[in-house]
Amino acid sequence: MTSTIYINGRFLTQPSTGVQRYAREIVANFDLLLENSELEHKVCIRCLVPRGTPSNTSWKNITLEEVGINHGNLWEQIDLPLYLKGGFLFSPANSGPFLHQNQAVTFHDASVFAIPHAYSFWFRLKYKLIFRSLARLAKVIFTDSKFSQTELSRYLKQSSEKFKVIHLAGDYIDRIQADTSILSRHNLSKDRYVFMVGSQSPHKNLAAVRDAVELINSDIKVVFVGGQYQKVFNKEIGRATTKNIIVLGYITDEELRALYLNALGFIFPSFYEGFGLPILEAMHCGCPVLCARAASLPEVAGEAALFFDPMRGSSIAKAIDNIFINQQLRNELIQKGYQRTKEFSWQTTAYKTLDAVLAAIKTHK
């Protein structure tokens, strides 16, 4: 008997962040798993999307179907459950129809509860409603780390067993062709800069890196990727250090890979993360990781990163100076990073997720 799984494909209409990256990778690897003869006639996966969604996918075994008349939240909360008529839905992007019971959903973290000041009032209201409703109704909830499992259990007042931990992976970065033109455009030389990726959200901790810039003894550049950072990098940085800071804003995946491949190190200073995918991206590219000892980050990095105190700019500056002057340390971090990445793969993530979804379907028929 064939089990049908519907995918909430709203993520295909959204800008690409870590959440959408997860959704695209998990579904693409579902597609690869369906080529297995054991699953070929046992599982049917259909990805449902609003009308007009670009069909820029290369799936061979998953169908993309346009349904409903609305878009955005209305489509997800009204059109999608009406079309499903009780069918089993997998929502991979932190959101789903909050009155649909026959559902598996992925919640990447509990940040909307833990750091509410990072979000607008309406965003907080929406996601708190969705999280609380689905925490009670969903058949299974996936999350990225044991840290997030504990946080979600505490804030949503559900048993930790309700949240199934399945780690993510960074192996997709290996498929990307590096665009090294970004280096010449910004006068960046190999091993003469460190960089970080992050938005202006408070939990990304840009202010601590700003403070660290003024304390670095090494003559290297610090590159910031992800946003314009007006609230952080305005008049607070003195003229003496401005020459060492480069703010790139949003860049392509190809440019990001080039930065990883040529950097002295990658800085990840966040004090709240559900997983920290860039850690594995950097390790795949042989880029030493300098990482905050906070939230889920030690769980992801293991012993393959140089940790610092995210609340102290001096601790970050010391880590940067250490990898600049200590070539042996850099080499050790690179080799440990390569070894660490072997413990994560999207095929494993997809297999465990699909297996749990099928178990939920079987249990609740």
Image (cartoon, rainbow, N blue to C red):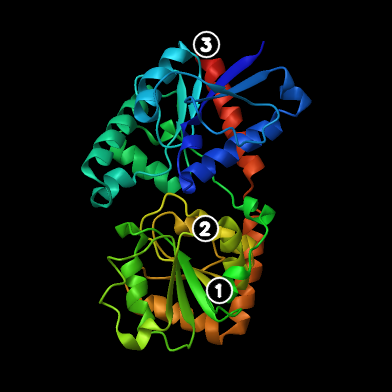
Residue positioned 51% across, 54% down in the render: 277
Question: Mark 3: which amino acid?
Answer: Lys
Compared with 169, 190 (above or below) is: below
Q: Which mark is residue 12?
A: none
Question: x and y percent of residue 217 in the render?
Answer: 43, 89
Q: Is the residue under label 2 in contact with that under label 3 (CB below 8 Å)?
A: no
Question: x and y percent of residue 364 in the render?
Answer: 50, 14
Q: Mark 3 or mark 2, which has the lower sequence index?
A: 2
- Label 3 Cα crowd, 10 Å radius (few <14 / some 14-19 / many 20+): few
Question: Mark 2: which amino acid?
Answer: Pro
Q: Which mark is residue 278?
A: 2
| Residue for badge 3 | 365
Badge 3 element: loop
Badge 1 element: helix
Q: Please identify, in this view, whether the residue under mark 3 or under mark 1 is nearer the observer.
A: 1
Left or right relative to 239: residue 16: right
| Residue for badge 1 | 185
Distance CA(mark 2)–CA(mark 1): 23 Å
- Label 2 Cα crowd, 10 Å radius (few <14 / some 14-19 / many 20+): many
Front-most of residues 306 and 161: 306
Q: Mark 2 or mark 1, which has the lower sequence index?
A: 1
Q: Quadrant of the N terminus?
A: top right
